[in-house]
Image (cartoon, rainbow, N blue to C red):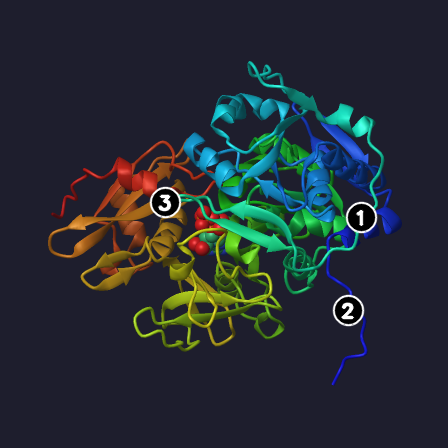
Amino acid sequence: MQTTMQDRPLTLSHFLYRAERYTPSKLIVSGTATGVEERSYGEWALRTRQLASVLDFLGVPRDARVATFAWNSARHLELYFAAPCSGRVLHTLNIRLFPEQLTYIVNHAEDDVIFVDRSLLGLLGPLLPTFTTVRHIVVMEDGGDAPDPDGVNLLDYEELIASAHPAEFQELQETRAASMCYTSGTTGNPKGVVYSHRSTYLHTLAVLQADSIGVRESDTVMPVVPMFHANAWGLAHAGVATGANLVLPGPRMTPSALADLIVEQRVTVPAGVPTIWMGVLPELAGRDTSALRAIPCGGSAVPKALSEAYREQLGLPILQAWGMTETSPIASVAVTRSWLQDLPEDQLADLRASQGPAVLGVELRIVDQESGEELAWDGVTRGELQAAGPWIASGYYNDDRSAESFTHDGWLRTGDVAVITTDGYVRIVDRTKDVVKSGGEWISSVELENEIMAHPAVAEAAVIGLPHKKWGERPFAAVVVRPDASVTKEEILEFLEGRVASWWLPDDIVFIDEVPKTSVGKFSKKDLRDRFADHVLPTE
Ligand code: ADP
């Protein structure tokens, strides 16, 4: 039977239309090198339309990749919509990648034009001769003072906008590519994920769901998560779609600058990775944080101790989300279900330290890696977490590594090991490559880290497996002590007794100044393994 409903495409121009028509006076506040700049959604929408004409003027073909090398800002948000709404594909470049990876990505995606913040020109400039397809470099003045690289013709963003007419957007197919993002490539070259208008539209609605982050018009949302890291978790799109005020921190990324923005802009929903929130908490002490409603956090496991420290200091625990570049990224959010609300506080804290139930629209399952059988949701059986849904990737862009990451029935193999409880809460045990395999048993590096980080003197702890003659691998912990605190290896081991099984206790603990981080602020186990490759465990 034929449906009688209209077949209207789910495209991003609808969000822009909403901002333009319904919430033109709401604000986008951008941090700059020297202060903050405000722009209304009305002004933003007009400039976004002008920017689409600039792309025509520059001869950027339909479907061509429009790359950005930029902080979070209103200009970056103009690019977020001008490129896809005019039929081009936005490609956000991670400003913290190694130079060789950036060259690989720009050439692999065949970027046509790159929009770069002045303050980041020093990083990009030396790489320009290695890019094979880029025809234009457009500079966005952000208060930075990096000099022009020699011998390159740079275009000025504001000059181009000033002379451009606002474009009308043509209707596009919803399945058309809207943007692309590469994974951060902790193993091998980064892999490209291409989002469609439809997948981005539906993912935005997931961010708006009351049982996820629940972004609404009355919010002031601050994505600290970079706009180049998995779509800023959909929060930039959610801002435009709802008309929530957006605070985009730009280069003002120090903990104290972020705390100032939260307090001064009365932010309700700031979002970032755990390392960001570890730094910001002390900066918020004694200040007016009454506007805060939710603090979404993901990208790596949120230590229970961190979430509890927020609850104790601000009265608001952290809202953990799980996802990947391949899942747009929001796939699960650790909201507390109504039938669990009366649990004792400590058990509620455990729920919040899990990755939560899948959001409406996403299906998750755990699977035995050897047999491929789906496993029980009993809270103990561990398996590989797999995901399916309309905003989950089905392959990588032009990459023969796709086959190994997807199952025969089209589910994404996440590379995470997890259990799922009878209530549907996912608990990530570890990344497959990070679990410590001790005598055929698994030790979760994530859980061990969390328990160590519960010690009041510990700021950060990262656990890796080191080779062991008898057991194959044994856990080894690198620990960062809080400023003004002190703790010994023996004290940590004593603290862990009773908190973890005795055979989980690390065979060695060393103290370091800082845990190495990846380009998106996660603990870099790879760097840690390299650094301690020759470390001999005392139990050997
Ligand atoms: P990359 O794969 O390059 O690190 P992503 O940001 O796409 O970049 O990383 C996705 C991975 O991050 C997930 O597979 C998972 O291992 C980890 N991750 C994300 N959110 C969480 C979370 N809340 N808890 C534990 N791990 C998480």
Residue 7 marker: 2
Q: Nearer the viewer, residue 319 or 190?
A: 190
Dot placed on the residue nearer the N-terminal end, 3 or 1: 1
How far across and down, in percent of the image, does residue 523 sit?
40, 43
Label 1 crowding class (10 Å Cα cut-off): few <14, some 14-19, many 20+? some
Q: How many marks?
A: 3
Residue at (27%, 38%) from the top-left corner? 530
Q: Nearer the viewer, residue 406 or 424?
A: 406
What amino acid is found at the position of numbered circle 3 in the picture?
Gly
Dot placed on the residue nearer the N-terminal end, 3 or 2: 2
Which residue sits furthest bottom?
1
How far across and down, in percent of the image, does residue 109 sit?
53, 42
Identify residue for label 3.
Answer: 188
Residue at (32%, 51%) from the top-left corner? 495
How far across and down, in percent of the image, does residue 412 sit?
46, 63
Q: To which quarter of the image does residue 11 belong?
A: bottom right
